[in-house]
Amino acid sequence: MNYLPEKESQNRFQNIRHYITQKYPHLAGIFIFSRISIYYFTGTLANGVLWIPQDNEPILFVRKGLERAKKESSLSHIFSYKSYADIEKICHEQAMPITENFQLGIEASSIPYQLAQLFFSKIKAFQNHTAQPIDDAIKYVRSIKSEYEAQFMREAGKRQTLALEKILPFALQEFLEKGEQTYSYLSHFDKNLCTSYPKEKNLTEKKIAEICIDIYTELEHDKMCRMSAYGEESFYGHVAIGNSLNTAHYYNGAMGFQGIHPALPCLGSKNILTKNTPLCVDMLFNYQGYLTDKTQCYFYGKEKDLPDLAKKALDFCIETQDLIANTLKQGTIPEEIWFQTLEKVKQYHFEENFMGYKQNSVPFLGHGIGLTVDESPVLAKNFKAPLENGMFIACEPKIGIPNFGMIGIENTYELIDNSVKNITSLGNNIIYLA
């Protein structure tokens, strides 16, 4: 079964070729290695190599799972291979030779140095010419979503909004009022391992994450949350309460968190939600492979109990969100939004707090999103390529407050018809759990 329409696949090949022609006219073709990029172009998450010549049909080389790849992809040229040395041979047999005078591009960020060296040694053209990294081309093409992709992004946003702004606060309020009796299968087999049943009396970060996962599962969340950057991982997302929101962490994001264990620094810890403390839930949503990103901030108390500094931080985040709504449009330069936001940071005297408190601070306001969490463009310094219709960008103004936690807003925006649309919010900037 072909999930990716053939016309959609053809358009994507056309787009990447057009970009290569404009920026790298000397290249005869490009090699792509990452499974997610291979999926983007072919519709199958193949273990292999994708060859896209500029003047011929693309060829997918599959190391394992050939029959599945042929069922899932509309490509007419899909072949099995054992060694990188087979690639030239197969191309020659298909009357599409890779000659020694070819200059070639590669997706450099997705192949380890050792494998890259092996690959170069097997393709004769690399003996005469240095490989040209073309990752920018792939990032650009993938950053502009087609209507086919946009429908999945919008649906993900719709379901994420329902989960975090409606269902989760209802579930948390129920738990806070009544507690929860939970049935355990494990208790029938090993009571020593069964530590949290039969009654969970406290609402911990970990429990909140579990509740959110249950809600997401009912909403057909597809579980996998991929990242592009080397070494980065994401599993659903993160939940943090109070000052654990300022916990030092490795993750390239503003929100601090402790996580389950040093080997699993995700979801949430055993920290308990107590009165007059903030809670942030940053849980990604995946629908049909496409992700939306949203951080919802809650406060266990009434609005009047929110500390003055937190109110000031909320005002800043709302003003920044309004700035985003007015400037996140086709033609805007990403770094200009970043610099405008920094001016607002100075006005509020949040230099130490912006986008994470002190060591947790990150130098960006937002990021593209799609098949992976961390796509182009980035709202940060030195990102000068104008925004375009069809981009989806997660914007996340956040302020870390010592001895309190964090106040923040994150939503995913669609650039469409020379305007911007928030696809992950009904307007609840903070939700009070009275």
Image (spheres, helix red, strand yellow):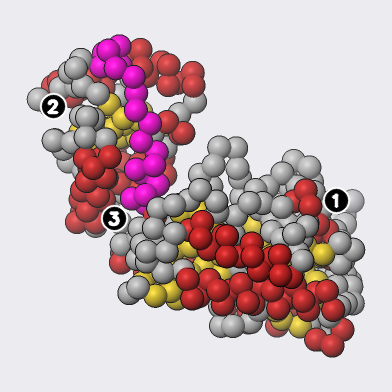
Secondary structure of the residue carrying tag 1 is loop
> Does residue 152 lie above or below 14 as drawn?
below
x and y, in percent, of residue 162 in the image: 57, 78
Tell me which label, 1 or 3, sits earlier in the chain. 3
Q: Which residue is mark 3?
A: 4
Tell me which label, 2 or 1, sits earlier in the chain. 2
- Quarter of image, res 208: bottom right
Tag count: 3
> Does residue 100 lie above or below 406 as drawn?
above
- In the image, residue 304 lies in the stretch drawn in magenta: no
Instruction: Name the foreground residue: 313 vs 176.
Output: 313
Q: Which residue is mark 2?
A: 96
Viewer-nearest of discs 2 and 3? 2
Viewer-nearest of discs 1 and 3? 3
Contact (Cβ within 8 Å) of mark 2 with mark 1 = no
- In the image, residue 139 lies in the stretch drawn in magenta: yes
As measured in the structure, the alpha-carbon distance from the residue carrying label 1 to the one carrying label 3 is 45 Å
> Could you tell me the amino acid type at mark 2?
Met
Residue at 33 percent of width and 50 percent of height: 141
- Quarter of image, res 430: bottom right
- The image's mark for residue 193 is 1
Q: Is residue 71 visible?
A: no
**Range of residues picked out in magenta:** 123-142
Instruction: Name the foreground residue: 293 vs 214.
Output: 293
